[in-house]
C-alpha cells in the first residue's frame, strides 16, 4: 500500500499552493508594499509583501507617499 501525498504528508508544495497562500496573506492584510521596504517591530517588509499599518495615521501617510497600495489595486499606466 502506497502513501498518498497530502497536506500533512511532508510533500513539497507546488507553486500554485505557494501563490494561493501568498494571495490569502495579501487579502487579509489589505495592503502590499509597493515601493522600497518597511521596518517595523523587528520585521522587514519588502516590495510585494502583505502589510497592515498599525494605525490609520500611518496608513494614510504610507498610502500618500506611494510606499503601500491596497491589495488587488489595478496598476495605472501613464
Image (cartoon, rainbow, N blue to C red):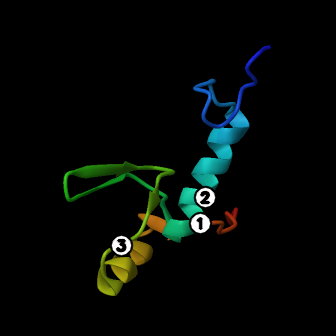
Total residue callouts: 3
Proximity of marks 1 and 2: CB atoms separated by less than 8 Å = yes
Q: Earlier in the sequence, mark 3 or mark 1?
A: 1
Instruction: Please tell me which residue is depicted at 70% across the width and 33% down the height of the picture.
Output: 6
Q: Nearer the viewer, residue 61 or 16?
A: 16
Q: Please, which residue is most extreme toward the right here?
A: 1
Image position of 53 (left or right of 14): left
> Where is residue 35 shown, x and y percent of the image?
44, 55
What secondary structure is found at the residue carrying circle 3?
loop
Instruction: Please tell me which residue is depicted at 61% across the width and 58% down the height of the picture.
Output: 24
Q: In the drawing, what numbered circle is on residue 24? A: 2
Instruction: Please tell me which residue is depicted at 72% across the width and 39% down the height of the picture.
Output: 16
What secondary structure is found at the residue carrying circle 2?
helix
Q: Nearer the viewer, residue 36 or 51?
A: 51
Dot 2 alpha-carbon crowd within 10 angstroms: few under 14, some 14 to 19, many 20 or more: few
Proximity of marks 3 and 1: CB atoms separated by less than 8 Å = no
- Which corner quadrant of the image does residue 71 belong to? bottom right
- The residues tagged by marks 1 and 2 sit, at their Cα atoms, a distance apart of 5 Å
Q: Quadrant of the C terminus?
A: bottom right
- The residues tagged by marks 2 and 3 sit, at their Cα atoms, a distance apart of 17 Å
Q: Please, which residue is most extreme toward the bottom here?
A: 56
Q: In the drawing, what numbered circle is on residue 53? A: 3
Q: Please, which residue is most extreme toward the left here?
A: 42
> What residue is disc 1 on?
27
Amino acid at each position: 500500500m502506497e502513501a498518498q501525498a497530502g497536506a500533512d504528508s511532508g510533500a513539497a508544495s507546488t507553486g500554485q499552493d505557494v501563490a494561493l497562500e501568498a494571495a490569502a496573506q495579501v487579502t487579509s492584510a489589505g495592503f502590499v508594499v509597493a515601493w522600497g521596504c518597511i521596518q517595523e517591530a523587528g520585521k522587514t517588509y519588502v516590495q510585494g509583501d502583505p502589510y497592515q499599518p498599525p494605525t490609520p495615521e500611518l496608513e494614510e501617510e504610507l498610502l500618500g507617499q506611494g510606499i503601500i497600495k491596497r491589495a488587488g489595486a489595478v496598476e495605472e499606466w501613464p
